[in-house]
């Protein structure tokens, strides 16, 4: 007899359970390297969720699938950020088994409704039907997958422009949008403040979105690599926060380690700060 499988919990379910239990914000890390090995290392870090990025990272359907395999079995939830709000891409990533999707650059309710339609089968959406061929349904080993697909998917849309901030209440009101995620970097750029994620106007825009989500009764998350900023947004109601990225951690940590062993001339030193002799 073939295996019969049940769907795994989604990010939506995890956030709801954390809120019911009175737990704090869910802390996450970016996975941008495209490496399944690095993804697995990050999965064992103690973070509660991972964002596998395909928008700004060297990832494809095949590499994302390998990373989903690598982190499976760890006590961490993977979310996949797509490169664009595109019905074909959404279909493909859903079919390969990405259950938790983050859709970038959603600026208004119409674009949010398009994302919702892309993750739902007809008559409620436009997702193409290929479950017998797809890992999403475990090749039809999840009983009644077509009827139950909605419970296996969590959809988060990204607020990262001034236009999106202005429309955030309408975006949050769209049925099927499970939460919003705020990207301060692109938001700052759209406000004419490129590279100034900590600018008071940017922080104010982020806080407006957090407040709107709380009023709407939906979770909001934010990207914040500065610890004080991350803690501030958590205090303001952020339910999930990304606090670092694999490539950034590797870059900064390797630089710091190398700098401890280098003199101004580039020579290695012994414990007394003198050039080492070999």
Image (spheres, rainbow, N blue to C red):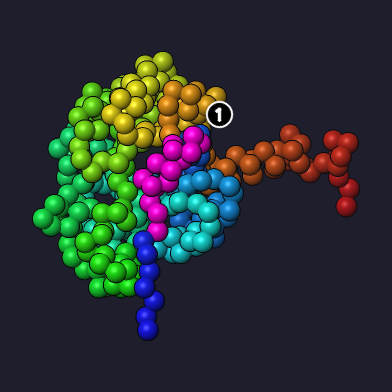
For residue 38, say whether it is visible. no
Tell which residue pokes out farthest to the left in this image: 123
Figure check: 107 above or below 75: above
Magenta segment, prevailing SS (helix, strand or loop): helix
**Image height check: is 129 above or below 220?**
below
Query: What segment is highlighted magenta in the picture?
Result: 8-23
Q: Position of residue 132 (x, y in %)?
A: 25, 73
User: The N terminus is located in which quarter?
Assistant: bottom left
Judge left or right: residue 225 versus residue 122.
right
User: Which one is nearer the viewer's eye here, 233 or 178?
Assistant: 178
- In the rendered image, the vertical position of residue 265 relative to residue 1, given as above or below: above
The one of 145 and 206 positioned closer to us in this rendering: 145
**Residue at 47% of width from left, 47% of height from top?**
49
Residue 188, horizontal then vertical, whole percent: 36, 25
**Spot occupied by residue 177 in the image (x, y as percentages of width and height):** 26, 41
- Which quadrant of the view contains residue 107? top left
Farthest-out residue, front: 20
Query: In this figure, which residue is indicated by the disc labeled 1?
Result: 227
User: Residue drawn 30% across and 41% down?
Assistant: 178
Q: Position of residue 152 (x, y in %)?
A: 32, 56
Find out whether residue 10 is within the magenta segment.
Answer: yes
Q: Is residue 148 left or right of residue 197?
A: left
Which residue is at 46% across, 64% downward?
69
**Magenta-span inclusion, residue 11:** yes
């Amino acid at each position: 007899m073939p295996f019969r499988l049940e769907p795994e919990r989604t990010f939506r379910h995890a956030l709801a359970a954390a809120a019911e239990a009175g737990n704090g914000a869910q802390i996450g890390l970016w996975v941008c390297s495209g490496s399944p090995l690095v993804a697995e290392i990050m999965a064992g870090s103690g973070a509660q969720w991972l964002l596998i990025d395909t928008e700004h990272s060297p990832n494809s359907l095949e590499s994302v699938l390998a990373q989903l395999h690598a982190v499976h079995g760890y006590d961490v939830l993977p979310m996949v950020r797509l490169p664009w709000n595109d019905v074909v891409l959404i279909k493909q990533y859903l079919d390969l088994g990405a259950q938790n999707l983050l859709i970038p650059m959603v600026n208004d309710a119409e674009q949010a409704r398009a994302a919702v339609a892309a993750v739902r089968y007809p008559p409620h959406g436009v997702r193409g039907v290929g479950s017998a061929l797809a890992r999403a349904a475990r090749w039809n080993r999840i009983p009644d997958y077509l009827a139950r697909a909605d419970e296996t998917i969590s959809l988060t849309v990204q607020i990262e422009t001034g236009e999106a901030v202005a429309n955030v209440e309408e975006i949050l009101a769209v049925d099927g949008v499970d939460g919003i995620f705020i990207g301060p970097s692109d938001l700052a750029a759209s406000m004419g403040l490129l590279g100034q994620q900590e600018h008071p106007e940017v922080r104010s825009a982020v806080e407006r979105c957090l407040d709107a989500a709380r009023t709407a009764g939906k979770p909001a998350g934010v990207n914040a690599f500065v610890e004080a900023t991350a803690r501030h947004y958590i205090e303001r109601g952020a339910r999930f926060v990304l606090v670092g990225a694999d490539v950034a951690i590797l870059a900064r940590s390797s630089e710091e380690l190398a700098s401890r062993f280098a003199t101004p001339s580039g020579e290695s030193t012994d414990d007394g700060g003198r050039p080492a002799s070999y």
